[in-house]
Image (tube, rainbow, N blue to C red):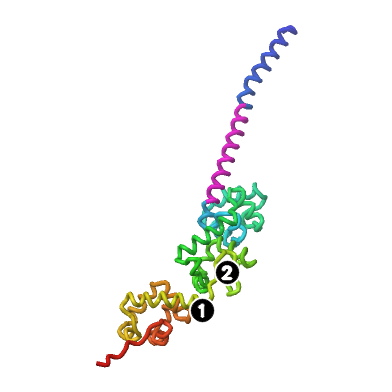
Amino acid sequence: MNLNNLKNSIDDSATKSKTKQKPIDQTIGETKQEVEKLTEYSKQEAKKFILEAFKNLGVEDTYAASIFPLKKFKEFFSLKNIGEEKHDLVNNYTLELFGSKLSNMLHSDFLTLGNSIGLSEISEKEQKTKFLALLAEIGIKLDDMAFTHIKSNSSFLWKQACTSYVMEKACGSRQARDLKKKDFLKLCDYLGVKRIDKKLKKEKLEKNVKQFLASKGIKHIDDLAYVSKSEFLKFFENKSFRNYLEIFGIKKSNFTIQKALNLTNNFGLTKKLDDKY
């Protein structure tokens, strides 16, 4: 074989080799793209799953995330609770996000996680609006709001992050377990509640209760003798009646006829005039 033939033979081999190599490079590139797509899809799936979990746990904004117990979060996302597939999905996401698995997360990581999935920051005005909506949900109006209303509904109110936010702004701490009267007054000031003098409030309630009892045919002290305990208990559905008795420490749960009779003068009722003829 002469030199020209040998050169042509080598060139042909090189060309064939390149022809074979091209599909391999293309395949590698396509595979890489598929892996990237799959990775991005997994990220979005993880974010979607975590966001839904946050909402189920009542964590809907960055403030809620800042006060949420990390231990409770880890328990929810445990392998036993969410299964291997979801557990791996979330772990892979957190590893890439801040280099740590769920079991080793710090609270600062928790906040990073919340921000990464799109939790929004709710303004002070919005937090107050949400809190007022909670009060309305349990029938509390600002003008009639009393310390006992907040205290007796604490288990419901403090499940919501907006309550902690409002109390922290008003009092400097969340006061979830040990609300004091002085803190309640600070809350009133923060919400712009006009405080009514106790005596005036009592007189106003007494007037409302007297009108309410009159609507039930009870206009005199003597009329109370014909009212059964079951009827009295129904009166607690009236807000003024309920709030008035709460001033004296009487609730539906500890109500007795005798306690009601002891308050007859306070109800503003009078004795029926004796028939002289």
Residue at 64%, 27% in the rendered image: 25
**Which residue, as the protein is rendered here, is positioned at the far bottom?**
276
Quadrant in the rendering for residue 39: top right
In the rendered view, does 66 fall on the left or right side of 256? right
In the rendered view, does 118 fall on the left or right side of 241? right
Q: What element carries label 2?
A: loop
Q: Which quadrant does the C terminus fall into?
A: bottom left
The residue stretch that appears in magenta: 26-51
| Residue at image mark 1 | 199
At label 2, which amino acid type do we have? Ala
Q: Is residue 32 above or below residue 99?
A: above
Viewer-nearest residue: 28 or 198: 198
User: Per the image, is 268 magenta?
Assistant: no
| Residue at image mark 2 | 176
* Residue 271 x, y percent position in the rendering: 35, 87
* Residue 175 x, y percent position in the rendering: 60, 69
